[in-house]
Amino acid sequence: MQAIIHTDGGARGNPGPAGVGVVIEVGGKTHHFKKFIGHATNNQAEYLAVLLALEEAEKLRLQELQFYLDSELVVRQLNQEYKIKDAELGRLFVKIWNLRSKFKLLKFAHVPRERNKEADRLVNEAIDSGA
């Protein structure tokens, strides 16, 4: 069974107080996760949202993951269509790459921001709780 995962990350001020939001839909159930991550950039937050989703998917014993992000840059980097020039994003990419082996299928797709509203709401709640 394939899980549908919406992730989002954001920072107020870029960089600034940041949070991540994850929505995992599988088998008719929806799981929500959010986390205040401290001071970060928007792109760092996007990557950290994917990492949180992978950690939670592993706990849920999920094997096939279809990710939807509203950051076209991060999607293209994760799909190895764009090079990563930022050292911190490169480090986060390697973490994600190393976690890939724990799953049977991992796909990343871009969606417009309006199709990622629930994950975005979680980001704002996370930032509000930690700021």
Image (tube, rainbow, N blue to C red):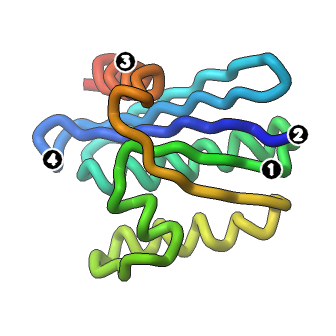
The vertical placement of 78 against 65, above or below, is below
Q: CA distance from mark 1 to mark 2?
A: 7 Å
Viewer-side residue, 8 vs 127: 8
Q: Is residue 33 above or below residue 128?
A: below
Specify the amino acid type for callout 2: Met
Q: Identify the residue at horizontal 80%, vertical 17% (top origin).
A: 28
Quarter of the image that includes the N terminus: top right
Tag of residue 125: 3
Cα distance in 3D space between marks 4 and 3: 17 Å
Identify residue type, mark 4: Asn
Q: Are marks 1 and 2 in contact (CB under 8 Å)?
A: yes
Instruction: Categorize mark 2 by other alpha carbons within 10 Å: few (<14), some (14-19), many (20+).
Output: few
Neighbours of disc 1 within 10 Å: few (<14), some (14-19), many (20+): some
Pointer 1: what residue? 64
Say whether disc 1 or disc 2 marks the residue closer to the N-terminus: 2
**Mark 2 element type:** loop
Give the camera-side residue of 72 and 18.
72
Which residue is disc 4 drawn over? Answer: 14
**Regarding mark 3 in the picture, which secondary structure is present there?**
helix
**Residue ID for mark 2:** 1
Of helix, strand and loop, which one carries label 4? loop
Q: CA distance from mark 3 to mark 1?
A: 28 Å
Task: Identify which amino acid the numbered label 1 is placed on.
Answer: Glu
* Residue depicted at 25% across the width and 45% down the height: 39
Q: CA distance from mark 3 to mark 2?
A: 30 Å
Q: Earlier in the sequence, mark 3 or mark 1?
A: 1
**Kind of residue sitting beneath label 3:** Glu
